[in-house]
Amino acid sequence: MNGESHQVLRAQLGAYVLGRLDEPECVALQAHLDFCGDCRAEVADLIPVAEALAEVDPDRVTDEPAVPPGLGEAVLGRIRAERRTVNRRSARLGIGVTLAVLAGTAIGYGAADLLRATQPPIPLESVAVRQLATRVAASANLVPHTWGTEIKLTARGFEQGAGYRVVVTDRRGADHPAGEFVGNGPGEIRCNLNSSVLRTEAIGFRVLDATGGTVLAADF
Ligand SMILES: [Zn+2]
C-alpha cells in the first residue's frame, strides 16, 4: 500500500468508530485493520472519545462551533492521561493523529450532526432473537433506512477470535450479506450490521459461524 492510500484509510478511522462509513468503505477498512497495528491502536484510542461524544445531547448543541463542547475536554483529558503514563514521541504522535481525525470528522459533518451520529435514531424496532448456541446471549434492534436495513446487535458469548457473518433474508427466501464480526468470548460486542434489503422486504436475519451453522436467528 502506498502512503497516499494509507492516508485515505487513516482519515476514515474517525468516521469508522462513529459507524458512519458505508459498507464497502467499512469492509475495506476492516480488511486493513486486520494487518495494520498502527490503525488498530488508533481505533482503540478513538473509541473512548466517541463514547464520550455519545453522552452529549445534540439538541443542545448548535452547528456554530466547529468543535462540539465536550470534545476538547475529552481529548485534553486523554492527552493528560497519556502524558502521565507515557512520554514517548510515538504516544504524542498518536494523539496528534487522534485530534486531526476528530477535527476532520467534526468539520465534515458539522458539530450537531457529529453528535447525532453517535446516538441511535429513535425509535428502534426491537426483534426477538433465538439463541441457538447455549453460550450466546444477544438482543437486537432494527433501523429502517432508505438504502436498506441496519441491525444493531448486542451480544456476549461468541467464541473468542472466531469469525461470524450475518445474513438478512428477504421475502423470497434469498439471503443477503449484512457484514461480519469477530467473537469476543464473554466480553460484550455491539455491532451495527448493514444490509441492502429494505425493511419492508426483510423477514429475518441469521448469524452464521465459520462452518455455516446458524448460531443466532431472528424473525421480523
Ligand atoms: Zn493502517
Image (cartoon, rainbow, N blue to C red):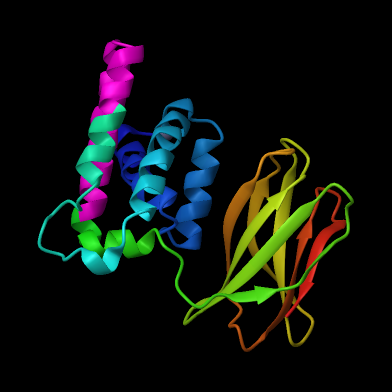
Q: Which quadrant holds the N terminus? A: top left
Residue 133, relative to residue 2: is it above or below?
A: below
Q: Which quadrant holds the C terminus? A: bottom right
Q: Examine the residues drawn in magenta and state their main secondary structure.
A: helix
123 left or right, relative to 154: left
**Quarter location, residue 121:** bottom left
Residue 129 is one of the magenta-drawn residues: no
For the point 41% across and 62% down, the residue is 119
- Ligand 1 in which quarter: top left
69 left or right, relative to 168: left
Residue 123, how many percent across, how many down?
51, 78
Residue 17, how many percent across, how many down?
43, 48
Total numbered badges shown on the rendered structure: 0
Residue 127, how many percent across, how many down?
70, 74
65 left or right, relative to 39: left
For the point 72% across and 44% down, the residue is 163
Residue 158, relative to residue 218: is it above or below?
A: above
For the point 20% across and 63% down, the residue is 61
**Magenta region:** 79-106
For the point 67% across and 39% down, the residue is 187
Residue 95 is one of the magenta-drawn residues: yes
206 left or right, relative to 35: right
Residue 122, how many percent across, how many down?
47, 75
